Amino acid sequence: MSEFYPKIVAFCCYYCAYSAADLAGSMRLQYPSNIRLVEVPCSGRVDVLMILKAFEKGADGVYVAGCLEGDCHFLKGNYRAKKRVLYAKKILDEIGIGGERLEMFNLSGSSGPRFAEIAEEMVTRISKLGPSPLNSRLVSFPNCKDATAGN
């Protein structure tokens, strides 16, 4: 059996979390390459549908990274994001994917080492959980054309 490399999507706010990721790169800190960064203007712009769509498109894990609590550039965006992540975790539990595959983190722009730690932490967590149950439920129907085949 081949080794499992989880696909993880990280929604990062531009001002803090994405800056922390950039700093981690500038500092030449090593973190897993299977993290896919999605830059958003504010973590508060990440809604439940974006999170669920990431899982639908094949992510094994997702995290939202925003500014430190009380220090959001858009005042309360990170509080909105936190509420949405908690709600999405409940949905993921209810549909059988598992809320533990989703997490919220708060970072400052100078938290490059912490960003690398979070990436490692998420890869370790998702590796232990295995592939997303949603990915194993994708079924091909014999009488339907494959949408990706260009037919």
Image: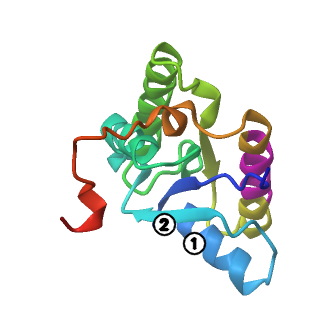
Q: Which residue is mark 1?
A: 19
Apparent side of residue 112 relative to residue 101 in the rendered image (left or right)? right
| Amino acid bearing label 1 | Ser
Q: Residue at x 76, y 63 (%)?
A: 116
**Magenta-highlighted stretch: main secondary structure?**
helix
Q: In x, y percent, where is residue 61? A: 59, 44
Q: What is the basis of the colouring in this image?
A: rainbow
Is any part of residue 48 visible from this angle? yes
Q: Which residues are magenta?
A: 117-125
Secondary element under disc 2, as helix, strand or loop, is loop
Q: Looking at the image, is 41 positioned above or below residue 88?
A: below
In front of the other: 62 or 29: 62
Which of the numbered marks, if any, corresponds to residue 62? none
Question: Does residue 103 belong to the magenta stretch?
Answer: no
The foreground one among 39 and 8 is 8
Q: Quadrant of the C terminus?
A: bottom left
Dot 2 corresponds to which residue? Answer: 15
121 falls in the magenta region: yes
Q: Examine the rendered structure and indicate whether residue 77 appears above or below residue 15.
A: above
Query: For the residues marked 1 and 2, what is the alpha-carbon distance in whole angstroms?
Result: 6 Å
- Note whether 102 is above or below 144 in the view shown: above
**Do tag 1 and tag 2 residues touch (Cβ < 8 Å)?**
yes
Residue 16 appearing in the image? no
- Residue 55 placement (x, y as % from top left): 46, 42
The residue depicted at 79 percent of the width and 54 percent of the height is 3
Callout 2 environment at 10 Å: few (<14), some (14 to 19), or many (20+)?
A: many
Q: Nearer the viewer, residue 134 or 9?
A: 134
**Position of residue 109 measured from the top left corner of the image (x, y, whole percent):** 62, 67
- Residue placed furthest toward the left: 151
Q: Where is residue 141 shown, x and y percent of the image?
A: 31, 38
| Circle 2: residue type | Tyr
In the displayed structure, 146 sits above or below 126; it is: below
